Amino acid sequence: MKKFSSMAVIAAFFLIWEAAARLNLIDTQFIPAFSVVMREVFSLARSGALFVHISASVIRLFLGIILAVAAALPLGFMLAGWTPRTADFLNPLFTNLSMANPFTLIPVFILVLGMGEVSKVGIIFWVVLWPALFSTIAGVSQIDPEMIKAARAMGASGTKIFLSVILPGSVKRIFTGVKSSVTFGFTVLVGAEMIGAKAGLGFIIFTSNQNYNIPRLYVGILTIAVVGVAVSLFIERLQKLIVVWEESAGPAARETR
């Protein structure tokens, strides 16, 4: 029922948009009718150009996410699990670095890493790194020390404790941190693609604005929204597939209460 209501609201929005354009309630020079935008969508899709731009943005996004998570997880586990005092010492530095506006850092990344793919992936890496790191540290820190002691008392090795206690207990918090940063990271990527890119959704918006192709400009905006939702749903689905122990442990946990 909730999904149906959401779909109904979205459909109503586009219907109102179309009606407002047809009734001249809005200036179609700046806000074209929804049907005009959709014709441009189909035109770009038929030529294959739309999918080229989508794939370019999505590949950059996932490369940045994968690299950020690959760096944040071992660092977070090490700091929170083995050197918590070091984690507390470095926390102010990490916090200040994470608060730097990534949009203002785009020129710095381009200056240091060049106008190519590395700088675009690098800005996504920067945006996703800090929430992933903070959520990993928080996830490990919240684990009950008694569970780790009990595992050691049962003869579990360090690797076994990590895989059976620390990782399951912190992965949900890690996913929460990553999900919270992906949407903003995608927005930052679009901004980076407006500078020196040859493909991508940001490139569509930039060139459409330069050429005053307003329908194509709205194609870029709508596509960004759709792809952003799709990426978020993908990460949620991935979390459900990975965090399987919560569902299996749920009934047992309730029985013991």
Image (cartoon, grey):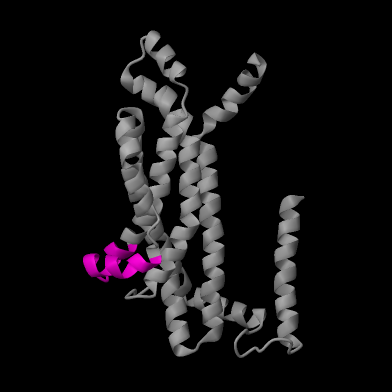
Query: From the viewer's perspective, is residue 239 above or below residue 13?
Result: above
Q: Nearer the viewer, residue 165 or 230?
A: 165
Q: Is residue 123 left or right of residue 35?
A: left
Picture layout, residue 234 above or below residue 14: above
Count of all numbered marks drawn on residues in the image: 0
**Residue at (53% x, 69% y) in the render:** 223
Comparing 207 with 101, the one in front is 101
Place residue 13 in its image quadrant.
bottom right
Q: Residue 32, position in %: x, y?
A: 63, 85
Q: Residue at x 52, y 60 (%)?
A: 228
**Residue 112 is one of the magenta-drawn residues:** yes
- Please tell me whether residue 203 belongs to the stretch shown in magenta: no
Height in image: 206 above or below 127?
A: below
Image position, residue 164 (x, y; %): 42, 23
Q: Is residue 220 left or right of residue 164?
A: right
Nearer-the-camera pick, 92 or 126:
92
Residue occupying the point 59% across, 29% down:
247
Residue 35 in the image, given as x and y percentages of width and height: 66, 80
**Residue 116 visible at all:** no
The reply to whether residue 186 is visible in this rendering is yes
- Quadrant for residue 118, please give it: bottom left
In the image, is 242 to the left or to the right of 66? Answer: right
Q: Magenta segment, principal secondary structure?
A: helix
Note whether 233 is above or below 138 in the view shown. below
Q: Which residues are magenta?
A: 103-120
Which quarter of the image is occupied by the C terminus?
A: top right
Residue plotted at (43% across, 23% down): 165
Percent across and percent down for residue 185 are 44, 59
